[in-house]
Amino acid sequence: MTVDFLFDFLSELLSDLIGSGPVLIISMLIPCLMLFGFITIYALIVIYAELKVSSFIQDKVGPMGQGVGLHAGKWGLLQPIADALKLLLKEDIIPSSADRPLFILAPFMIFIGAFISFVALPFGESIIVADLNIGLFYILGVGSIAVLSLILAGWSSNNKWSLYGGMRSAAQIVSYEIPAGLSLIVVIMLAGTLNMQDIIRYQAGGMFSWIFFDNPFVPIAFVVYFISAIAETNRTPFDLPESESELVAGFATEYSGMRYAFFFLSEYANMFVVSAVAAACFLGGWHSPISGFIDSPAWGVFWMISKTFFLIFIMIWLRWTLPRLRVDQLMNVCWKVFLPVALINIFGVAIWTVVFNQ
């Protein structure tokens, strides 16, 4: 279901009542509201999952509800909702020395950058907001808005810890975008397109038709992309921009209330985006692992979401397993390891394709 489909459908129903302009606005608003609802529900689910997974790793119980009185519901299921309400009800404080317009703008900018990335993500064979012929390039492009937003947040706060966090974030995201992009070039070379749906269609035919299994060099590209994506989302062990042991809360130090929540809603939204791109480009997207087995369009949504959530689980697992890197280690891994490996990998895929896939 795309915006074009909705526009054509609503035009037939409402063309006699209102003009084409309002119909176009309505056909764009409906997917936006659905996406916002999806992101909100998804964030609540993943926050709960992260609380439970981290508790299990640390040999704790985690959120739970028991006894009489006010608590987080059965199995602690209401804990993410309680946390969200807590942040909504907190006082919204803006420091007197902050650059007020930019301070207010930054958290919304970072969320908008994550939100509009969902436009080109395929959720199923026919479920995509906008089936762009440059979908993969579009997702990589709008993902860069996060850099500007975090620099704005750090600079406008007029706080040295916030500024350090913003500068670290800019260096980290810009650096790791390069090996991530080079790794996706491998996918573009093999599929011959930037369209997300066409990349997934190229992988039809079961698990061993997925790009991940195309040749021995592609798994290396997947690993480089996935680790770079973790760094781009500022997740542990790459959470240097907000390292609480050094920078209080990094770029978010001066934020409170819902503005503070927007940063972390955007983090979870970006986790979904990078995981969905990995699932679509390397793991067959909405295709079943077994050709012809529960491979209908309805099951396609299940497979796409399942693969994405599996990669998100890996991110959560890594967060609670690995210690944070130092800043110098972070940059060394990018420029001295991932960048050369990603470049050599492109040549490896090209040579393998020419020699063995003719």
Image: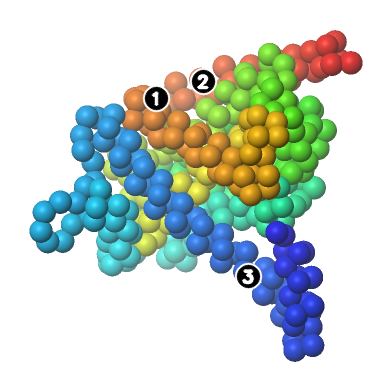
Quadrant assignment, res 163 = top left
Q: Quadrant of the C terminus?
A: top right
* Residue 333 tag number: 2
> Callout 1 environment at 10 Å: few (<14), some (14 to 19), or many (20+)?
some
Q: Which residue is tagged 3?
A: 29
Residue occupying the far front of the picture: 293
Q: Which residue is tagged 1?
A: 325
- In the rendered structure, the answer to whether residue 74 lies left or right of residue 105 reads left
> Callout 3 environment at 10 Å: few (<14), some (14 to 19), or many (20+)?
few
Q: Position of residue 172 (x, y in %)?
A: 51, 34
Q: Position of residue 203 (x, y in %)?
A: 74, 32
Q: Nearer the viewer, residue 98 or 197?
A: 197
Above-or-below relation of 146 to 33: above
Query: Label 1 sits on what residue type?
Result: Leu
The mark nearer the N terminus, 1 or 3, is: 3
Comparing marks 2 and 3, which lies closer to the viewer? 3
Q: Quadrant of the N terminus?
A: bottom right
Visible residue check, residue 281: no
Is label 1 in contact with label 2 (beta carbons under 8 Å)? yes
Query: Label 2 sits on what residue type?
Result: Val
The mark nearer the N terminus, 2 or 3, is: 3
- In the rendered structure, the answer to whether residue 196 lies left or right of residue 264 reads right
Q: Position of residue 275 (x, y in %)?
A: 55, 38
Residue at x-position 67% and y-position 40%:
295
- In the rendered structure, the answer to whether residue 50 lies left or right of residue 66 reads right
* Residue 55 tag number: none
